């Protein structure tokens, strides 16, 4: 699997699904599959699968792993 990268380097093509994470000062972490999304009613940001606003601000990202073999 790929290494975590700073969120500023994440793809912003509105098509790439990525794994995002937010590291918190208390050591906890939120994660979600997300993609960059630009809408007329919302600020450009990462959304959960392009539909729902994330309830955290991602700090890191990595590509999704390959799916399991059939």
Image (spheres, rainbow, N blue to C red):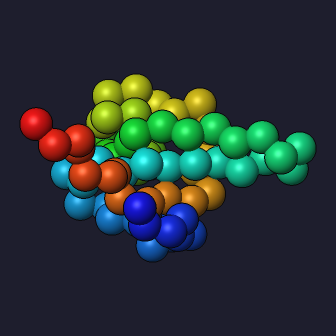
Residue furthest to the front in view is 70
Q: Residue at x 78, y 40 (%)?
A: 28
Q: In percent of the image, x 89 and y 44: which residue is there? A: 26
How many marks overall?
A: 0
20 left or right of 47 in image: right
Front position in the image: 12 or 19: 19
Front one among 9 and 4? 4
Q: Is residue 5 above or below residue 31?
A: below
Residue 5 visible = yes
Could one spot residue 38 in this view of the protein? no
Q: Is residue 22 left or right of residue 2?
A: right
Q: Residue furthest left?
A: 70
The x, y position of residue 36, in whole percent, is 34, 51
* Quadrant (top left/top right/bottom left/bottom right) for the N terminus: bottom left
Q: Position of residue 70 (x, y in %)?
A: 10, 36
Would you identify the image quadrant in which residue 4 lies?
bottom right
Coordinates of residue 13 in the picture (x, y in percent):
23, 60
Query: For residue 40, what is the image quadrant?
Result: top left
Identity of the residue furthest to the top in this view? 52
Q: Residue at x 23, y 44 (%)?
A: 67
Nearest the camera: 13 or 61?
61
Give the percent coordinates (x, y) of residue 15: 19, 51
Instruction: Report the residue at 43% width, 48% height from top.
Output: 19
25 lies left or right of 61: right
Measured along the vertical axis of the image, is residue 60 above or below residue 68? below
């Amino acid at each position: 699997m790929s290494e975590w990268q700073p969120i500023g380097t994440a793809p912003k093509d509105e098509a790439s699904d990525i794994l995002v994470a937010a590291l918190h000062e208390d050591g906890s972490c939120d994660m979600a599959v997300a993609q960059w999304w630009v809408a007329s009613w919302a600020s450009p940001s990462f959304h959960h699968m392009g539909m729902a606003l994330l309830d955290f601000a991602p700090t890191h990202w990595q590509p999704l792993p390959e799916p399991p073999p059939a």
